[in-house]
Amino acid sequence: MSALEVTDLTVRFAGLTALDAVGFTVRPGSIHAVIGPNGAGKSTCFNVLSGVYRATSGSVRFGGADLTRMPPHRIAALGVARTFQNIALSRFQSVEDNVMLGRHRLTRAGFVGAGLRLPFARREDTRHRARVRDIARFVGVSEYLDAPVGMLSYGVQKRVELARALAMEPKLLLLDEPVAGMNGGERRAMAEVIVAARADLDISILLVEHDMGMVMRLADEVTVLDFGRRIAAGTPTEVQRDPEVIRAYLGVQAADAADAADSAGAAAGSESETA
Ligand SMILES: Nc1ncnc2c1ncn2[C@@H]1O[C@H](COP(=O)(O)OP(=O)(O)OP(=O)(O)O)[C@@H](O)[C@H]1O
């Protein structure tokens, strides 16, 4: 199994430094979380790792390969799969067909062979569909295989997206806010699948997540970003206690809480005035 090594990664957008010499290592078989307040640079980091954005400087290495300037399809071919913050599935296609799209890089028959339904292509299709059913069972969406994705609840769609990424048989899985917008039950179900994927499928996972409880429960190691800089790194317990993290991360929540308290106070005040 390979480590993902991010070294001195810098990304600038017209005068704004979104990532400033950020470094971290995702150890083989581990779950590594990247956290930080809004605008910290988490999505930018993710987009560089999956080839969507170009790094201004620094490097990203996975095993022996230098991913820094590779296009997304070549990064995927090295066994790096990703999910998106907003669901990126084909709403009118069935769950099975959506998950099959993840098998694309493993398919050898090609368009022509598959289109002509040559015996080799048929056998390959049967083999891939059997694997898709296994993966659907693994993430708990078997019962929806024939349903169009658009008909399903948000939580199930997020699991289908994970199934599609797993269908690529990745070595490294990049999860962009996997539980965003989910209710408590959906969050727990997703957390169980993520833990099982790491344990049963021998993959490393890098996750960007806002839900601190989820990060604390799932991650082996955490990298904390703020204004594009790495301000802390360590185990969840270590970063939770780090004064810089408390200031940067919880400071935001404290400010939010203060704002909320102010507006609640103002609302109560205006009510009492009218009463
Ligand atoms: N394509 C872009 N062009 C210009 N600026 C960008 C671009 N993408 C991100 N940025 C800027 O880079 C900074 C980091 O943004 P990024 O989306 O990576 O943060 P984030 O930590 O993912 O935030 P959030 O938690 O809100 O998703 C922000 O100031 C953002 O406005």
Image (spheres, rainbow, N blue to C red):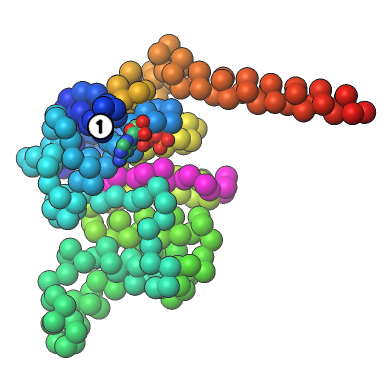
Is any part of residue 50 visible from this angle?
no
Q: Quadrant of residue 54?
A: top left
Residue that lies at the very extreme toward the right in this rendered image: 275
Q: Quadrant of the N terminus?
A: top left
Q: Please tell me which residue is depicted at 27% across the width and 63% down the height of the picture.
A: 102
Q: Please tell me which residue is depicted at 39% across the width and 31% down the height of the picture.
A: 39
Classify mark 1 as within 8 Å of ligand 1 or not, answering yes or no: yes
Q: Please tell me which residue is depicted at 19% across the width and 84% down the height of the picture.
A: 115
Q: Amino acid at mark 1?
A: Ala
Q: Quadrant of the C terminus?
A: top right
Region of the chain picked out in magenta, as a range: 173-185
Q: Quadrant of residue 24?
A: top left
Residue 95 percent location from the top left of the image: 40, 69
Residue that lies at the very extreme toward the top in this rendered image: 243
Q: Please tell me which residue is depicted at 18% across the width and 35% down the height of the picture.
A: 55
Ligand 1's quadrant: top left
Vertical relation: 93 (above or below) 82? below
Residue 239 percent location from the top left of the image: 39, 20
Residue that lies at the very extreme toward the front in this rendered image: 14
Residue 158 percent location from the top left of the image: 44, 55
Classed neighbour count for the residue bearing mark 1: other residues with Cα under 10 Å, few (<14), some (14–19), many (≥20): few
Per the image, the residue denoted by label 1 is 14
Q: Nearer the viewer, residue 240 or 66?
A: 66
Q: Nearer the viewer, residue 36 or 134?
A: 36
Residue 180 in magenta stretch = yes
